Image: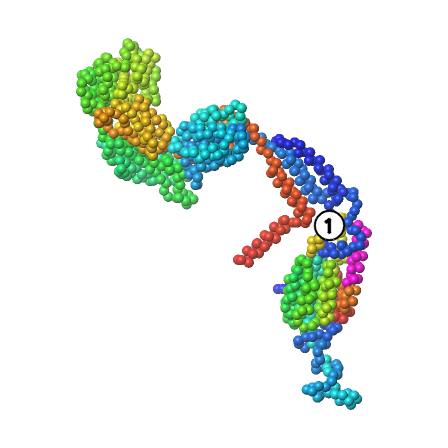
Amino acid sequence: MTPRVLSPELLGLSSRLRLASRRRVEGRFAGAHASRRYGSSLDFADYREYVVGDDPRWVDPNAYARLGRLLVRLFEAEDEAALRLVLDCSASMGFGGKLDRGRQAAAALAAIAAAGGDRVRVLLAGPTCDAGPWFRGAAALPQVEGRLLAAQPSGVGDLYAAVGRAYGEGPRGPVVLLSDLLVETWADTLRALAAGGGDRVLVHMLGRADLEPELDGDVRLADSETGAEVEVGLADEVLEAYRATAARWLDDVARECGRRGIAYARLIDDEPVDHLLAVTLTGLGVLA
Amino acid sequence: MRFAVPGGFAVVGLALPLLLWYVLRSRRPRVEVASTFLWRSTDRAVAAAVPWQRFRPDRTFWLVLAALLVGMAALARPALPVTAALGDHTILVLDASASMLADEGGPTRLELARREAQRLVERAGPGQLLSVVEAGPRGRVLLSASDDPVAASRALRSIQAAQAPADLADALTLAASLQRPDQETVTHLFTDGVVPAGAAPLAPAGLIVNAVGQDRPNLAVAHLQAVPAGGGAATAFVQVRNFGLLSTDARLVLDVIEGDTTVSVADRRVTLAPRGVADLVVPVDHRPAENALLRARVEPVGVDVTGADQADALSLDDQAWAALSGPREVQVLVAGPENVFLAAALGSVPGVEVTSANGVPEDLTGIDLLVVDRIAAPPQPRVPTIYVAPAAPPEGVILAGELELPALTFQDPDHGLMADVDLSGVAIAKAQALQAPALRAVASGPSGPLLLAGRLGPTPVVYIGFDLLQSNLPLQVAWPVLTANVVAWLTGPPASAPAVAGAPTVLTPPAGITGIQVTPPGGPATRLDPTWPQLVADRVGVWTVTYDAPPEVLATLAPPAPLVVNADPADSDLSRPRPGPDTPTDVSRVAGTAAPQAPSNGLRVFGREILVGVLVLLLLEWASTHGVRPLRWWRALRARRVEKAVQRS
């Protein structure tokens, strides 16, 4: 029996939520999200000039009476959303419960997408990007969970390439990046994330130890990804300086996300995922 | 335990700077975190810059301190006094006995000994002298005090194993003679046995015994004797021995060899216990021609307890020879008054036909042996002669008077006449006082010789200096045995006993010859002095004997019997006690005798070995500092191998 990432409670919560695209999507199948194309729904969208070949039934006689021009009525189309979940699998995600929380969040988002009839793709961003297939429907949920469970932290995550890969294939749709962004090039990653046309969401996975390290004495800190070492004398003032640096960095990330139109949510590894789903992402309009 | 460089302990002073270094710059433990990105971005310096910190020794400190102390010990170069393998002068003595021909799974024991000796030669430095002595049946100096390793190697290569036992006493005496008082001499003996107790006192000081070889199975024909059984037939007494530590089955084949013809006369199968002996009496129902030989061959058959073919590590002793007596008749003429004892004793010797006469006839044609009993002897013996208290002795023997009740106090046990003869109970009433410089006293008393043997001119004679009727000798058991020995010695034995390789052998040539030539198997020929025809036969097999004599003498002689030489059973024991292989041993512990003590003048220094320990400690320190976990690597590697194996299966 495949071990489950989602708890029954989280699965129940996921069944009550839907993706709420803030931007128009572009799907291959009909769905519940406003499409970039025009369709045949009952919702009026726009007028355009009549051209030969248009169905005369869509010509608006009232507009012709007022303006003396032949205008054709256009209606909204609704497509499925193609959700991309980019999960950071670098070595730093293996510290604390970041990766486990990332797996749960990603699985919950995938379950929400499946319940809404949307398709989903899980990209694992390790030293190389493992794009994986598209999944659709609730029946594919165990496969998504199996793929997430197979993700193991190792090396330096190439987030920039992974995000680029997420935009490079398939129809337009929302992209959710789940990462701790503990790299020098975090701003480049956000720039790449903002380059897409759909909704962009960053779930910033943080460990409590990243924010408030419990270290003492003089130590050599070794970077789990690069092996680079920093000698530190952990006096109170040094720890205070580190906390201030961490807080400033979090503000910078949030500010950069806001500047680039990326929805920013923060998840610390000792916090529950359902709060992220029910409160944070819902508040940001990512979920409804 | 000594220290070659005590000054190396001064390195311990480096411990103080090491301590200061740890105080001044405390070593920080390595902690792996998710990322150091934020730490590097911190505005203020995060590394402590306080020079004097509390001394907090960690694992690396103890490792470095241990490396320092071990390195100090290495620099001090601890040394143990050991027996020096090489001295100023190193004498290499190699056992070249027959047992060194044993197969040691490819190379022979001699080859193993040669390799060990060669290693010592290669270790010799400039100025160190080398000598090589071959310990064969006779010791031989092949190289004397040379500083040329090439010459030493050449001398070692020239050593060939003999087919006879080694005379270690002779070789060790030679080695001792090579010592020089101003040089530190070490002598190495490479042998597959122990130094005999008799040779140990002769060993030079500093003798190291290097044992070669391991216990090996071996079958041998330890003894073979053909005894005439009358009518031309013979009885073969064969002893087969198993020198191995496992029981074995063997096949024994007896062949009669007559010139180029070989006739198999017996084929037996025997089972031999571990280190067991089988004595077999085999009738040889075959009338042999003149100078026929009996050959016994033994070979292992079947498999041993491990299922492997039975092995035999030494082939030299797998066969033995014995001479078969031909249908030869000896004509004996007894000249003198009637003597029942003499006639009866001579008549009991197989093949002897006795005739009597009152005096010595002029014509002795057809007479093989003349007995002059109490009558005047001719001046010169013309045929082999037994003189029994002659009234007038021949030339070369001076009658100096008469002895009353002479005591018989000496008999020569090594002489052929005295084989199995005990004259201790003989009493003599009257005897001749004799002087015979050309003859050898075989039995004598304080007053002079009583029984002599030798040659008068070219003719062998035996001189009994008392009347048999004036003694109780004819009533002794020794009398018929002595008579048979005398007939055999004077006319040649009907079947000579096989000689043993390495032991002195005396031939019994007929009268009238001027020279003897013996040729071992494979040659070359050797000439012997006919007046003392003794040799040391050092080669196993059938030796050819030829006589030099005037043609008219040669025409009357029977063809000389070949000399058969068999291996010494002492060399066949390949499982005899010896020191373990590759364990140089002091001779005093081997022989258990008061041998000269080997000097403990060498030092075994352990500097380099300890430096390896220093390197290991420093490697551990490096691994600890850099977070390398070799055990973790090893476990991961092992897990990967198991995983691959599972996948393959």
The subunit letter for the residue under badge 1 reads: A
Residue under pointer 1: A220
Q: Residues within 10 Å of mark 1 (few under 14, many from 20)?
A: many
Tell me residue B384's x, y (percent): 24, 21
Residue that appears at 54% across and 26% down: B184
Tell me residue A171's x, y (percent): 67, 73
Tell me residue B595's x, y (percent): 49, 25
Of the pair A71 and B208, the residue shown nearer to us: A71
Relative to B611, does residue B629 appear above or below in the rendering? Answer: below
Of the pair A264 and A65, the residue shown nearer to us: A65
Magenta stretch bounds:
A233-253
Position of the N terminus of chain B, as image quadrant, is top right
Looking at the image, residue B599 sits to the left or right of residue A234; the answer is left
Residue B475 seen: no
Residue B105 seen: yes
Residue that appears at 64% across and 34% down: B76
Tell me residue A9's x, y (percent): 71, 66
Examine the residues drawn in magenta and state their main secondary structure: helix
Q: Residue B464's image quarter?
A: top left
Amino acid marked by disc 1? Arg
